[in-house]
Amino acid sequence: MEQQSNYPESINENYNNKIAGKLAEGNVSSNYENKKTKIKYDYNIDELVEGIITNNTPILSKSITLIESNSSKHNKLKQELLKRVLPYASDSIRIGITGPPGSGKSTFIEALGTHLTKLNKKIAVLAIDPSSTISGGSILGDKTRMENLSRNINAFIRPTPSGGILGGVAKKTRETIILCEAAGYDVILIETVGVGQSETTVRSIVDFFLLILLPGSGDELQGIKKGIVELSDMLFINKCDGDLIDRAILTKANYSSALKLLQSPTEGWKPKILTGSAINNKGIKQAWEIINDFVDITKKTGTFAKRRNDQSIAWVYTLLDEYIFNKYMNNKIFKNAKSDIESEILQNKITATEAVDKLINLLGI
């Protein structure tokens, strides 16, 4: 029988590396014991894999929690899990959705997700919430905002704190996508924390990138939008209803003109602009038709597969950078010299560049 845990399902690195939940006991498992409560958490790799490929939602959720663990004790288990479920990963469509606060990203996702489930599609929503820089906590309110979709048996919503990571995604979003695909989800929707010059990492893990905008937002094009617009495969001008219809039409015209000056982020595809109202379900069907056209065209030209391949290789080097950085930061020589060098910086004895050179030279690099 499954033993309940007092810890939240979704945690971050500031949560003392505790893992929520306990999976059923088995012969092959990784044990983690909480020193305060003396509760032992057993992770049976066979049961995890079986639960994922049979779309057992509680097991999928706990597997994602394991993937999100920052404890080094779970590294081997995580890699074994990913390796074993990878052959089961479905041929999904990965869609990144971003936009400024208040643009209606969650409403759009709920409308699109509901539409897709009616087409017998299985939907996974990975909603990334911003983490507090003070407490490390996160509201994780997307299940509340997507109330109807969260009750749909063909939809899976996983809110995850960003952990302070720039780029609009969480540290383990890539691995979570693999688990969801292995569980048989046809469409993976990734909602980023917001929009800005740094909110572009999601482009590197999705097939299709969608930007949600508000009517009358054309004036901001010279500000935060250009970096995102030039990465977008489609722009959806939301809340196009009532008194905002005329403004939405003008906004569409402004962005249509702007797109002519920008190079398409996807070879062989011209970015599309659509107006609609997610709350009134206007434009949702058309948005999905555009995404389908995109997939058909890019698969025929080979761009779809090439992007996936490029992303896989880029992922390797991203992980390599992280590994090297962590190894370096945890080196004893570095740790011993760190406080002295920081003191020299604060006393204006050395520059930041000199500090870096000193630290690197300590390791003989």
Image: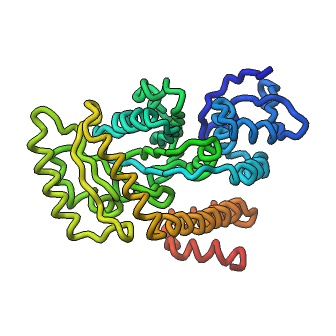
Q: Residue at x 67, y 38 (%)?
A: 16
Q: Is residue 18 visible?
A: no
- Determine if residue 68 is in view: yes
Number of disc labels: 0
- Of the pair 90 and 142, the residue shown nearer to us: 90
From the viewer's perspective, tell me whether residue 179 is left or right of residue 158: right
Q: Return the x and y of residue 344 as percentages of the image width and height.
A: 56, 67
In the rendered view, would you say 13 is above or below 198?
A: above
Q: Position of residue 272 (x, y in %)?
A: 27, 57
Q: Which residue is at the far right? A: 27
Q: Is residue 172 above or below residue 204?
A: above
| For residue 289, side relative to residue 27 (left or right) | left
| Residue at (77, 22) in percent of width and height | 2
Q: In which quadrant of the rendered image does the N terminus lie?
A: top right
Name the image quarter holding the C terminus.
bottom right
Residue 46: where, in percent of width, then height?
81, 40
Q: Position of residue 281 (x, y in %)?
A: 28, 33
Q: Residue at x 46, y 57 (%)?
A: 207
Quarter-wise, where is residue 336 in the image? Answer: bottom right
